[in-house]
Amino acid sequence: MSHMQALLSRAQNQCELCGSTNHLSIYGVKGPHLTDEDSALIICSNCKLQIENPSKIKLGHWQCLLTTIWSEYGPVKIMCYRILEYLKKETWASELLEQLYLSDEELIIAKVEPLKNPNDNQTVADDASTIDANGTKLLEGDSVTLIKDLNVKGAGFTAKRGTIVKNIHLTNNPEHIEGKVNGTAIVIIAEFVKKSI
Ligand SMILES: [Zn+2]
């Protein structure tokens, strides 16, 4: 079975996002031209047009995601994430985004290529925020949990995965936070932590 046939069979010959049968094609979530089986889905020309050019997005069309977010296929969920993330100023979209479940790995891929409208400047402000491994914004004084072992240069110890770091400080670099581990203030890369509740 060819790659396209395998995907069409999974998709039941329908767009995996909206169910349309119009002009189906393969879309790779790691880049539109990469169609590795685990990272591709079948989409229709209408979905494709809107994904590739978000200025043409029609809100009503994406109500289809109400059911699509429950797909069992990673690439389908990844596209749901990117579309809902783009639309999250709409209450319904942000509520759907909260219900969408992605594995850690899928979430990383989902964030690689966000939908971008060249006319929007909204990403500029977001870039200045410090965010954790889940994309949650970190604030001064938050507590975080390390999600991997970190070698602390110069201090001669390893900060273990699972260690809770209380009362973090933000730095001028949005990718770094500061916190105390074993009584020593260290710089931690924000994507190696998760915000604690
Ligand atoms: Zn579609």
Image (spheres, rainbow, N blue to C red):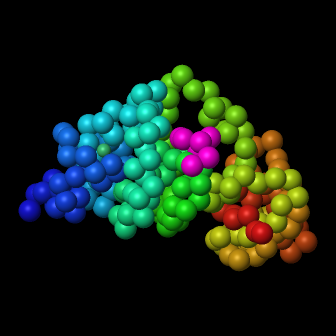
Asked if residue 147 shows in the view, the reply is yes
Residue furthest left in the image: 1
The front one of 75 and 88 is 88
Q: Give the position of the C terminus as an image quadrant.
A: bottom right
- Rendered location of residue 190, percent (x, y): 70, 56
Ligand 1 in which quarter = top left
- Rendered location of residue 28, percent (x, y): 31, 48
Q: Residue at x 22, y 52 (%)?
A: 14
* Residue 32 forms part of the magenta stretch: no
The front one of 3 and 179 is 3
Asked if residue 185 shows in the view, the reply is no
Q: Write down the region rendered in magenta.
A: 86-92
- Rendered location of residue 62, percent (x, y): 43, 44
How many numbered marks appear?
A: 0
- Rendered location of residue 32, percent (x, y): 32, 42
The front one of 101 and 180 is 101
Q: Give the position of the N terminus as an image quadrant.
A: bottom left
* Residue 87 forms part of the magenta stretch: yes
